[in-house]
Image: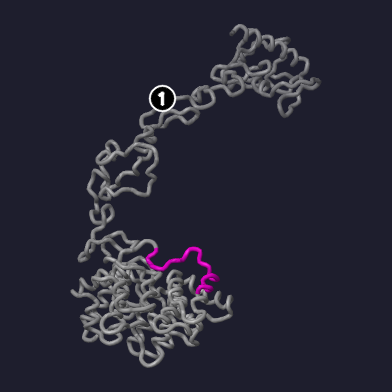
Amino acid sequence: MEWKKCVLFAFFDVLTAASVSQRPVGVASQDGIRLKGASHRRPASNVVQRTRRIPGRRAPTDPTMSYPGYPQQPGAYPPQAGGYPPQAGGYPPQAGGYPPQAGGYPPQGGGYPPQAGGYPPQAGGYPPQAGGYPSQPPQAGGYPPQAGGYPPQAGGYPPAPPQGSWGGGPPGGYPAIGMNHLANPGYNAGMPGGSAPQGPGMVYPGQQPLPGYPGAPSPNPTGFGAAPAPMPGYPNVPSPNLSYGGGAMPVAPPVKKGFRGTIKDFPGADPLKDVEVLRKAMKGFGTDEQAIIDLLGSRSNKQRVPLLRSYKTSYGKDLIKDLNSELSGDFKKLVMAMLKSPYEFDASEIHRAIKGAGTDEACIIEILSSRSNGEIKEIARFYKTEFKKSMEDAISSDTSGHFRRLLISLAQGNRDERPNVDLSLVKQDAQALYAAGEMKLGTDESKFNAILCARSKNHLRAVFMEYQKMAGRDIEKSIGREMSGDLESGMLAVVKCIKNTPAYFAERLYKSMKGMGTTDTTLVRIMVSRSEVDMLDIRQEYLKNYRKSLYKDISGDTSGDYKKLLLKLCGGSD
């Protein structure tokens, strides 16, 4: 191979020397030296190589050349003193230089060897590789080499676990995580993979178990990392507060899922057909009360109220007036109540309780303490539309003192209805109530009014529990000791309704039928207004507290068509 290169260099040098002797003058161009009278170009790098001076030496000059360093010689360069050593036929390859070559650069020591379509590998550089980085042996602590990717790096992540082991997602959810082995319910339990290591195995080699994880004690046994402990003095019972995770809240009435009323929508009810039934029941001599009972006792309120318009559309008459002329007594009152919307019925009951001689304070407090903010505002709106006077003004003109303040506060419909409970505020309110009553000579009624009318029901249930722990007696007994008259009755009604609404209405029904006679207005109001809300719960509380069913008490205390329709609203015996 070396002798071929020498022959090639010698031949090329002879041709170059002859060309130089014939064209002594050159003109510089952008890519090399263009010689006058010639069409070809010689690379500038060749000229630079040939005109390089050796330090300490002086190159001979040639008057026929534009650049020094080219001696005039026939055919070849003669040996020069202090210049290049004599060569056989030309210059051999030199380290670090670019010798003349035919169509390309010949390979040189320490240079770039020729390769197809790219740069050759360099000493100290990257070795030749096919399409990427060379594969290297796996490094400790790194990922195994992957095809077409980066080589493994030292100090990287540990090798990925195989499928079916920890990391692939356990079929039963992720493992317990230090909160007394509290499970993680939020992960997908159906992910493939094996089960996770438990206990002391959940640490990396050489690492101490972390506090709060399996294998090490929790640093906070009563806080995060363990189930929260009950507050001192409270029973360990479930919390009614959905936003608080502890067992520090008092027991609330169990939340009944689904519909808890006794009157439901009748499937396929047609108002035009229903008013035809009512018309036939009242037409001619006598009245078919049973037909009226069967129809009204099986329709919901939103199916009954439109009958007024349908009746007038079909017969051009007022259904209320026709029923008033055909019915009588408590049965008529019950039918009239069932043909009113809830807001209209409550507004009419408050109006009835205020007007005339005396005031039915229990009726007003019952409605205002048991309705939601939205319902109270609808009642007030309807009251003003129907009776041309605001409900607040009507209450204010017919009541007085702290009882009036209590009713007006409730009539605002502005109670906090958020479900969350602040335990620090619970203690503050309990202490404020205790200081305003038991610890004070006299009673600060305004403090009771502010707390009982503004706080949420969940909050007040917690306050009542804290108060009992603090004062040593139930808040109802404290109210009975500190207050009297209508204010006492009003405050007790608010407290009882907040504690357990169905039990409060069960007590109201029991008292309406107890003793001689029956308070039919109370019986009718509660049976109509609660039949589509919580009548099933009221029946359960009635049976639990009074050892007999509401159905039987109604049957024994009422009679006739009135009893039949009330029992329809009751829905059955327990």
**Residue farthest to the left?**
472
Compared with 65, 339 (above or below) is below
Q: Quadrant of the N terminus?
A: top right
- The answer to which quarter of the image holds residue 406 is bottom left
Residue 52 vs residue 535: left or right? Answer: right
- The answer to whether residue 5 is seen in the rendering is yes
| Span of residues in magenta | 259-277
Report the amino acid beneath label 1. Pro
Report the front residue among 366 and 562. Answer: 562
Residue name at image x 37 percent, y 61 percent:
257
Q: Nearer the viewer, residue 8 or 14?
A: 8
Image side of residue 241 versus residue 23, left or right: left
Q: Is residue 496 visible?
A: no
- Viewport quadrant of the C terminus: bottom left
Q: Which residue is mark 1?
A: 137
Taken as a whole, is the magenta stretch helix, strand or loop?
Answer: loop
On the image, the x and y values in percent for residue 510 come to 28, 77
Identity of the residue furthest to the front in this view: 285
| 295 or 85, nearer to the observer | 295
* Quadrant of residue 332 within the rendered picture: bottom left
